[in-house]
């Protein structure tokens, strides 16, 4: 029988961190991050890395493990995550994936294998084009040849846009076609996926706006300014929470304008996340505007027991 892996997914600010940690504590499990930006060192406030209090004493993995100067691919994530899942399972614990990076999660759910170009010359060509023409031009090109992938990407997803075009021109297949062709072997794990969303979109957007304000109160501006100074052309350029503040640091807009832009981009990102996850019919959706936290826990644990047979080992953490 395949080992069970629990996943808590959904858009930013939906409460995944809290629910994931509470479920892991109740089930005697450990949390594994599925967030493409939390992987990197630093960027703690901008990527909403869980605080010590938020972890509830539960071990959290794949957070702050990649140097800012390093590039990191979805293929590398899959390898590292599977190693981490196996390590957690080997100690008799329940792996609980928590995050909102749909591409990373799908590689696990569908056991995706990856196209690996030995010749990187065309990737280098696309990179030069992005520098000369702007990544917006490449995204527009991707919309013509692979509209599904393009719809899930933003101009900040520079590496993924280039990768999608590279795959298409090297194989004649879209990323979706490539993924479908790469799913010849089933995943070695049995996933039970809990999704958090909101029936009233305004509720989620209000949570996002409040989160941005809280980030500012916690020192986001200082963190971002220090990071731009140290990594002026690094991964920080891709992180929502940093790039929107650059015009403010450059004197091109007011702080209020920069924060309004940050809130808007975060809301757009949440919408893209929901679009991505809605395609997965295996996700069990729970509405954060209809259920308080104890009810979310009860519903989640009921789904997990029904789907996997796992029951709480720490009774005091079930509500």
Image (cartoon, helix red, strand yellow):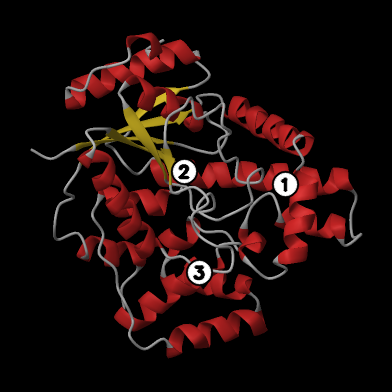
Name the residue carrying label 1.
Answer: 262
Give how far apart the Cα atoms at labels 1 and 2 are.
18 Å
- Residue 203 placement, left or right of 26: right
Residue 240 locus on image (x, y percent):
65, 51
Indicate the secondary structure of the residue bearing disc 1.
Answer: helix
Relative to 218, say whether 61 is above or below: below
Decide: few, some or many residues near mark 1? Use Cα within 10 Å; few <14, some 14-19, many ≥20: many
Nearer-the-camera pick, 5 or 252: 5
Residue in the image at 60% along x and 45% along y: 47
Q: Is residue 178 left or right of residue 139?
A: left
Mark closer to the chain start, 1 or 2: 2
- Dot 2 crowding, Cα within 10 Å, few <14, some 14–19, many 20+: many
Numbered label attached to residue 27 = none
Please state the horizontal and vertical placement of residue 143, each as a whole percent of the image: 49, 67
Q: Mark 3 or mark 1: name the one nearer the start of the chain.
A: 3
Determine contact: label 2, label 3, CB under 8 Å: no
Q: Is residue 263 visible?
A: yes
Check disc 3 and report its element: helix, strand or loop: loop
Give the label on residue 100, or none. 2
Frontmost of labels 3 and 1 is 3
Which label was assigned to residue 71?
3
């Amino acid at each position: 029988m395949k080992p069970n892996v629990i996943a808590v997914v959904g858009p930013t600010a939906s409460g995944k961190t809290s629910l994931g940690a509470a479920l892991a504590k109740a089930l005697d499990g450990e949390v594994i991050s599925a967030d493409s930006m939390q992987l990197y060192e630093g960027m703690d406030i901008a990527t909403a890395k869980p605080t010590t209090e938020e972890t509830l004493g539960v071990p959290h993995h794949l957070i702050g493990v990649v140097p800012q100067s390093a590039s990191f691919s979805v293929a590398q994530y899959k390898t590292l995550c599977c190693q981490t899942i196996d390590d957690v399972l080997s100690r008799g614990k329940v792996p609980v994936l928590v995050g909102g990076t749909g591409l990373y999660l799908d590689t696990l759910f569908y056991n995706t294998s990856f196209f690996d170009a030995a010749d990187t010359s065309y990737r280098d060509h696309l990179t030069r084009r992005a520098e000369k023409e702007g990544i917006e031009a490449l995204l527009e090109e991707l919309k013509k040849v692979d509209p599904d992938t393009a719809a899930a990407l933003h101009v900040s997803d520079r590496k993924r846009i280039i990768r999608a075009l590279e795959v298409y021109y090297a194989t004649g297949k879209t990323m979706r076609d490539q993924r479908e062709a790469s799913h010849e072997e089933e995943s070695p794990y049995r996933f039970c996926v809990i999704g958090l969303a909101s029936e009233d979109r305004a509720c989620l957007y209000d949570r996002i706006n409040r989160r941005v304000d809280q980030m500012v109160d916690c020192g986001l501006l200082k963190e971002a300014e220090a990071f731009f100074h140290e990594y002026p052309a690094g991964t920080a350029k891709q992180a929502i929470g940093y790039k929107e503040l650059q015009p403010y640091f450059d004197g091109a807009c007011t702080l209020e304008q920069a924060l309004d832009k940050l809130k808007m981009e975060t809301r757009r990102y949440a919408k893209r996340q929901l679009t991505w996850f809605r395609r997965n019919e295996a996700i069990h959706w729970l509405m954060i505007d209809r259920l308080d936290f104890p009810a979310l826990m009860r519903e989640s644990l009921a789904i997990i027991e029904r789907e996997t047979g796992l029951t709480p080992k720490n009774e005091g953490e079930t509500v």
